Every structure is written in structure tokens, then in C-alpha cells.
Amino acid sequence: MALLELKNVTKYYNQTIPALEDVSFSVDEGEFVSIIGPSGAGKSTLLRCINRMVEASSGEISVDGVISSSLTKKKLRALRTKIGMIFQHYNLVDRLTVIENVLHGRLGYKSTLAGILGRYSQEEKNQAFQIIKILGLEEQVYKRCDQLSGGQKQRVGIARALIQNPKIILCDEPIASLDPNAAKLIMDHLRNISTEMGITVIVNLHQVEIALKYSDRIIGVNKGKVVFDGLPCDLTAAQIQAIYGSESEDVSFDLGERHAG
């Protein structure tokens, strides 16, 4: 059984043009999937429908065998502990330290009162330190997040997602605000999370060459529709044209570069 399944998912923000139209695909445990497409294609809406940050207008989404659209608030909160989320602009609390931001990933497991009071077990704190070390942030553990670089902030975002013990991590343009060196480091970490931890990773990307290098599979989206779903080695220049349309001339890619892992 697929870990994630979308069936005929459509989303309207208004009644005229759908942001997503009849999107169907499934993702297996441990897969690394990149979703590519031009700005405004519906990539962010797609990720936000998966964790119900945005409600789909129609269709069905199931995560780990559970259909999310019918869940009560309490059950949705429990399901979301299985779904980590990483944002382009990090979504951290700048005035708090790295360790405090990472521990926020445990809030889905807490009562409201325990969350407000910041009550975390020693086991949770130990796990946070361990994840922070894996991501190379041990020297920043007590720094406020407003003192970090963009790449460091995004690694804090990854650590916060990992401490949820998720089955899926959704990444919404995680490297769009980063320089090439920081972007490579983030993508390497995400690839390792998929390969070594067996966690499914779904990444929205604008950069075709990065999708080609890191992905097990690529889904191309244009105007809310899936126009390509296949292996990186099957992505042709004509298909890139179909995904990006007139923007394809501005998209840098190298069809000779493939993920070798």
C-alpha cells in the first residue's frame, strides 16, 4: 500500500480557474520525489493540501492509510505528527534558540498546556541534541535563530521536522532563498534522510538540474495539472517544455546529469 495517495484532487481559490485540477498520484515509503514547475503552477497548494493547511475542493488524500479529509481536528493533529513540513522562509521563531525551535516539532504530541509551558522530557531533549548534531548545528544549539545564516535556519527547520518522527517530509521550495553551497548542503541532508532513515521526502523545486540529480522520481506540474510523472532518466527536453512552457528557455538544466545514488 502506498504511504501517500491522491485521487482526483482539485482546488479552487475562486470559481473560475483551479489551482489544482484532477491530480492523482501515489508515493511509496522512502521515495524521494521532486515536484517541478513554473511559479504559480500549484506546487505549494499541492503540498498544503496533503497536510490540510489548505482544504482541497474535491478529491481524496490518504496518508498512511488514513483519508485526511474526513478527520476531526483532534485526529488531524495526530496525523500531522507523521507529516513534517519545511518552508522556503523557514517559519522559525527568531527570538528563540535553535534547541527551542527544534523542540517545537514535538508540540503535536503535547497537550495545549504542556506546549505553552514548554514541558519536554529529557528523552525529547536528548533526541533534539542528537538531530542537531547530525545536521552540523551543535555549535549553534543555544544561539537565537535570528543570529543564523539562511542555510543554518533551514537546517533548524529540517531538525524540527525530524523530531516529529515523521513518515513524510514535505519541503516547499526549501532552497529558493539559499546560495548554491547552502542549497547543496540542504539537498544532501534531505537525500540522506530519505536514503538512510527511510523517510519519504517530497520537495517542490524550480531548479530542474537539482531535481535530476537528487530524485528517485519527478512530477511535473503546469497550471494545476500533472503533465509528467516518471524517472529522472525519462525527462526529455520536450517534456521540460511541456512543464515550463514559455519559461523553459530561462530554466537551467543538464539532461546529462542524473542522480547516481
Image (spheres, helix red, strand yellow):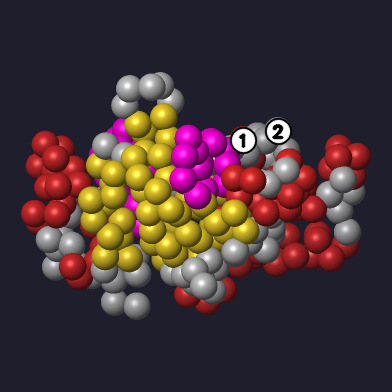
Q: Please state the extent of the stretch shown in magenta in the rendering.
A: 34-60
Q: CA distance from mark 2 to mark 1?
A: 6 Å
Residue 38 in the magenta stretch? The answer is: yes
Residue located at (86% from left, 53% from top): 120
Label 2 residue SS: loop
Verify CB contact (< 8 Å) between mark 2 and mark 1: yes
Decide: few, some or many residues near mark 1? Use Cα within 10 Å; few <14, some 14-19, many ≥20: some
Relative image position of residue 255 (x, y in whole percent):
14, 63
Residue 41 in the magenta stretch? The answer is: yes
Residue located at (18% from left, 68% from top): 234
Of residues 160 and 37, the one nearer the viewer is 37
Q: Which mark is residue 95?
A: 2
Residue located at (35% from left, 31% from top): 18
Asked if residue 250 lies left or right of residue 43, the reply is left
Label 1 residue SS: helix
The three-letter code of the residue at mark 1 reads Asp
Residue that numbered label 1 is attached to: 146
Of residues 161 and 219, the one nearer the viewer is 219
